[in-house]
Image: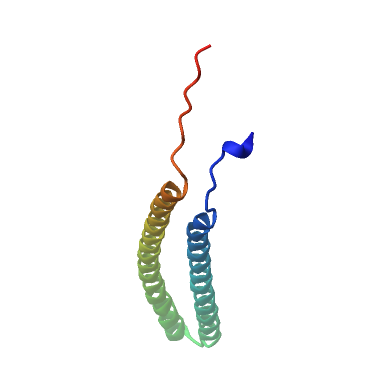
Amino acid sequence: MFNNIPAVDFSAFAAPIQKMIDLNTAAIIKAFEVQQAAAKDLLSLSQARTKAALEIKDIDGFTAFVTEQSEITNSSFQELTESTQVATEDAKAYFAEVQAILTESQEVVAKAAPAPKIIAKKAA
């Protein structure tokens, strides 16, 4: 029954799969590193602002603290906007690379798999 199946070099199918694994691994590592850096920055900011709050001694110190908080909030919002734009561009690049790998894999499959043979039915 399976004697009619032509031999196919299955090793050709592994290359696109490995490219997807490598791409996904790189994307996950990059996302982890970005999140880790953001967490460290947030921790440092939190510690610095806690220290600043503890150093408030009078109304002038409180006013300065609130002003700094407002500036930090504006700066943080700007950084969030920029990082969102970077993440959007990274996602577009990722999906373009996925599409390229999928297109390439179609070509690999087309070359590796022989064309199907049409067997005419014999008249009864």
What's the coloring here? Answer: rainbow
- Against 112, is 19 above or below? below
Q: Nearer the viewer, residue 117 or 12?
A: 117
Residue drawn 35% across the image and 69% down it: 78
- Against 85, is 10 above or below? above
Q: Is residue 23 left or right of residue 74?
A: right
Residue 90 percent location from the top left of the image: 39, 64
Residue furthest right in the image: 1
- Against 89, is 70 above or below? below
Q: Nearer the viewer, residue 90 or 61?
A: 90
Q: Nearer the viewer, residue 111 or 91?
A: 111
Residue 72 percent location from the top left of the image: 41, 76
Residue drawn 44% across the image and 81% down it: 65
Q: Quadrant of residue 98?
A: bottom left
Residue 81 percent location from the top left of the image: 36, 65
Count of number-bearing discs: 0
Residue drawn 64% across the image and 33% down it: 1
Q: Quadrant of residue 79?
A: bottom left
Residue furthest top in the image: 124
Residue 63 percent location from the top left of the image: 42, 80
Q: Nearer the viewer, residue 77 or 26?
A: 26
